Image: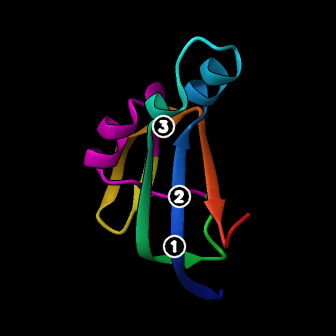
Amino acid sequence: MGKIITKLVIINNIDEVLFEESIITADKIRSVQIDDVLIDTGATTWALPAKYIEELGLKLMKTVAVSTATGISERKIYQNVKVRLLER
């Protein structure tokens, strides 16, 4: 598995759609930029600190059971983000 450290921009995709439909202005599109993010290229999911989830206003999609080093636990899955990584 490779690892990359880079800047990550996460954008609320629903806000972008509302902007495209002229419902909100560009300054109302919620986004966060996180510098020096460690990207694990072998990962299948990623975690986002709760403060960013709240700041972005993300909607809960579902709760799933996950297996971790400490056993089985539940994690929340959120939806409707756009990720900009390596300027793409």
> Which sits earlier in the primary sequence, circle 3 or circle 2?
2
Relative side of 56 to 10, left or right: left
Residue 30 pos. (x, y %): 44, 37
Relative side of 1 to 11, left or right: right
Q: Residue at x 64, y 58 (%)?
A: 84
Helix, strand or loop at label 3? It is strand
Q: Residue at x 36, y 51 (%)?
A: 72
Helix, strand or loop at label 2? It is strand
Q: Which residues are magenta?
A: 45-65
Where does label 1 land, which residue? 7
In this view, the residue in front, 22 or 63, is 22
Quadrant for the N terminus, please: bottom right
Alpha carbon separation for disc pair 1 and 3: 22 Å
Q: Which mark is residue 77?
A: 3
Q: Are marks 3 and 2 in contact (CB under 8 Å)?
A: no
Q: Amino acid at mark 1?
A: Lys
Where does label 2 land, which residue? 9
